[in-house]
Image (tube, helix red, strand yellow):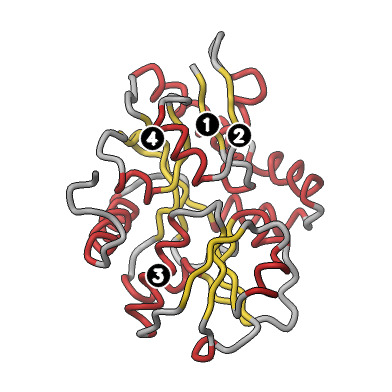
Amino acid sequence: MKLGCLPYLNVRPLVYTLEHGGLPSGWEMVYAPPSRLAEMLATGEIAAAPVSSFATFAHADFSICPDICIAADGIVKSVLLLSKKELQNINTIALDTSSLSGANLLKIILNESYSMQPTFVRMPPDPVSDMLNVCDAAMVIGDPAMLYPKDGLFVMDLATEWKKLTGLPTVFAVWAGKHITPELVEVLHAAKSEGMSIVHKIAREESVRLSLPFEVCDEYLSEIMIYDLGEQETRGLNMFREKAISHGLVGASNE
């Protein structure tokens, strides 16, 4: 069995023990950004992955593993709109090609909260500076969003904006697959539980990998990120789906 995995800091507590001897015999991990994982899941290249929540709206045959998500209730620090101009002066936005949830959340937020419908251009986030050279602003996710210098830029945190708009958490990703078996659920739940029990260790290792202060990584993983798909997170996920449908971003039939 092949499991997909995100290449970002935010997923580390969910997969760390799987990468360190916790995978059942014959299973393997495949790494790709959210948009690519959704494609691989749709074509059957992988059995399950922590995919963008938006992908589950667009694919009716994706089932969600219960009780696991990647979410934030307010500030997230890793899904950002970075701009050279004040918001009201933005005409063009470069969208991170890695992103599905963040890109569509941004469209909803700009439309509903600011009555904006700028021109969007899909671009790779490496480097972010190229995105900002081509467009007035750049929507960036994951490690590139955390690492890019913010001096002189206007910064919009999308989870903060979603909280203002809806009063609910933002669910960026969920573990999903076409066939979520009891064995898979057991493996993923055990990995999450074990990962959260050593979250400070993970934060220390990741701080070295990313050249970020330990305190930044530790706060992000242990205080900012939410990994339990509870009642409020489910409400936030359902609200995202409803708004994605009402804005025409995905069909009501989830085709």
First-in-chain label (3 vs 4): 3
Helix, strand or loop for disc 2: strand
> Do residues under tags 4 and 2 come within 8 Å of each other at their CB atoms?
no
Badge number at residue 176: 4
First-in-chain label (1 vs 2): 1
Q: Nearer the viewer, residue 140 or 167?
A: 140
What residue did someone put label 2 on? 31
What residue did someone put label 1 on? 4
Residue drawn 49% across and 38% down?
Answer: 37
For the residues labelled 1 and 3, the Cα–Cα distance comes to: 27 Å
For the residues labelled 2 and 3, the Cα–Cα distance comes to: 27 Å
Mark in the foreground, 4 or 2: 2
For the residues labelled 4 and 2, the Cα–Cα distance comes to: 15 Å
User: What's the amino acid at mark 3?
Assistant: Lys
Residue 33: quarter of image: top right
Q: From the viewer's perspective, is 128 left or right of 248?
A: right
x%, y% of residue 236? 32, 58
Q: From the viewer's perspective, is 248 left or right of 73?
A: left
Q: Nearer the viewer, residue 199 or 20?
A: 20
User: What's the amino acid at mark 4?
Assistant: Ala
First-in-chain label (4 vs 1): 1
> Do residues under tags 1 and 2 come within 8 Å of each other at their CB atoms?
yes
What residue did someone put label 3 on? 107
x%, y% of residue 46? 47, 26
Mark in the foreground, 3 or 4: 3
First-in-chain label (4 vs 2): 2
The local crowd at label 2, few if under 14, some if 14 to 19, many if 20 or more residues have their Cα within 10 Å, is some
Tell which residue pokes out farthest to the top in this image. Answer: 25
Helix, strand or loop for disc 1: strand
First-in-chain label (2 vs 3): 2
Residue drawn 44% across and 69% down?
Answer: 106
